[in-house]
Image: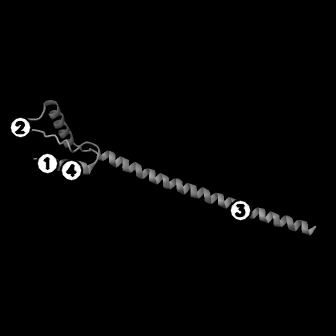
Amino acid sequence: MRKKYTGLVIGGGILVILLVWISSSYNSLVKKQEKVGQQWSEIQSTYQRRLDLSLVERIPQPEDHRAEAERRRVFEEGLPAGIVVQPVPEFEADVHDLPSLARFADVVCGAC
């Protein structure tokens, strides 16, 4: 009879140890998941801050409005007398490529 209880006590002890290990593993996984969620929210807030800053930089300034108004006037009325625009057929500038625009400016201003 004593051997029967010894086996049950050992089995119960192993079961208790197993349950403690499973619950601690689960708790550590939940903590890790919360930490990952927190880090992703920090990344998201950083991206949002960058987007907000880039939108602030894109707000047109008063001098931009004057330049745009001048471009519209020239487009609608034409250039003033005495100004001749020479086309540069061998060079095409991409407005989103800054080095290309710099080379274009050098070519155009070199003729000035």
Circle 1 crowding by C-alpha within 10 Å: few under 14, some 14–19, many from 20: few
Which residue is at the front of the view, 36 or 105? Answer: 105
Which residue is at the front of the view, 21 or 100? Answer: 100
Q: Amino acid at mark 2?
A: Gly
- Asked if 53 appears above or below 17 in the picture, the reply is above
Query: Any mark on residue 103, and which?
Result: 4
Which residue, given by chain and number where applicable, does mark 1 sit on?
109
Q: Earlier in the sequence, mark 4 or mark 1?
A: 4
Which residue, given by chain and number where applicable, does mark 3 sit on?
20
Q: Earlier in the sequence, mark 4 or mark 2?
A: 2
Specify the quadrant of the image occupied by residue 29: bottom right
Q: Amino acid at mark 1?
A: Cys
Specify the quadrant of the image occupied by residue 64: top left
Q: Amino acid at mark 3?
A: Val
- Asked if 72 appears above or below 42 in the picture, the reply is above
Q: At numbered mark 1, what does the secondary structure look like: helix, strand or loop?
A: helix
Query: Real-space Cα distance between discs 2 and 1?
Result: 17 Å
Query: Real-space Cα distance between discs 4 and 2?
Result: 25 Å
Q: Earlier in the sequence, mark 2 or mark 1?
A: 2
